Image: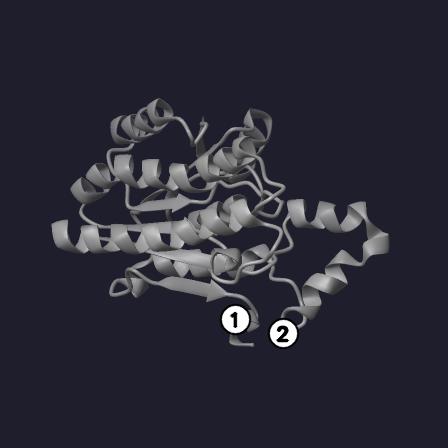
Amino acid sequence: MSERLKNKVGLITGAAQGLGKEMAKIMISQGATIVITDINEKSLVETAEELSCKHMVMDVTKEDQWKNVISNIEKDIGSLNILVNNAGIGGGGDVESTDLESWHLVHSVNLDSVFLGCKFSLPLMRKSGNGSIINISSMSGIVASHNMSAYNSSKAAVRHLSKSIALHCAKSTNLVRCNSIHPVFTRTAMVQSMIDAAPERNIEEKLVQQIPLRKLAEPIDIANAALFLASDESSFITGTELVIDGGLSAT
């Protein structure tokens, strides 16, 4: 099955690197026309050239920029079948040490962007005849930690928002589905830099100890899951969370 996404058009946010880039790469390889966005213009252009795909610089927290991106996709391509809300940031700090500014920033990037993306993409996806919304959450949205209050909260909210959107779509049209993906610690550049920055702390070893499969997830593991949810193979799956955690939540 080399063209699982033939004739489908997708939009992936935060796709200049990491999980977004890996998802764009595999979806393009399976026949999709993919538009990638990111706030980092330099990396975005480099990735777009590498993958030979369309790109647009976007701050996912800005309503007017979402409207512009969707309008351009409709004008230039004419349809939208896949939306991957992948853009996000980390945020450490327990509830007492987290200031309100940091709290708002994490929720703006991780949660508000998902709301905006779904809100403004849905009309075009519905008009396109079918669609799959894939919201990238985290295991941190299911299993909390004491020192990531804002991140835990934002990712848990993405999980529940996805369910609400799925029910709305099912009621208003059965052509668009919505699900969330919840990865465990994944070997992205961001995680690897954290590991490399403090080798004396044995960060990778501590992360791996929490995972029954005894290894970090790789970006392709998450990309394969997104590919499945984007394809017609998952046409009866909506309103659920796909947990990719190496068994962590089973413990």
Q: CA distance from mark 1 to mark 2?
A: 12 Å
Give the mark, 1 or 2, whose residue is nearer the N terminus: 2
Question: Which residue: 30% across, 31% down?
Answer: 70
The residue sitting at the left extreme is 172
List x then y, in percent, for residue 150: 52, 45
Q: Do tag 1 and tag 2 residues touch (Cβ < 8 Å)?
A: no
Label 1 sits on residue = 249
Q: Observer-nearest residue: 239 or 34?
A: 239
Three-letter residue code for mark 1: Ser
- Residue 224, relative to residue 55: is it above or below? below
Asked if residue 240 lies left or right of residue 221, the reply is left
The residue sitting at the right extreme is 200
Question: Which residue: 60% across, 44% down?
Answer: 96
List x then y, in percent, for residue 94: 61, 48
Mark 1 against mark 2, which lies toward the viewer?
1
Three-letter residue code for mark 2: Leu
Asked if residue 125 lies left or right of residue 152, the reply is left
Asked if residue 190 lies left or right of residue 47, the reply is right
Q: Residues within 10 Å of mark 2 (few under 14, many from 20)?
A: few
Q: Which quadrant of the figure has residue 67?
A: top left
Q: Which quadrant of the figure has residue 65?
A: top left
Q: Is residue 4 visible?
A: no
List x then y, in percent, for residue 244: 50, 65
Helix, strand or loop at disc 1? helix
Q: Observer-nearest residue: 1 or 246?
A: 246
- Residue 238, relative to residue 55: is it above or below? below
Q: Which mark is residue 161?
A: none
List x then y, in percent, for residue 210: 65, 68
Question: Which residue: 46% across, 65% down?
Answer: 243
Label 2 sits on residue = 213
Helix, strand or loop at disc 2? loop
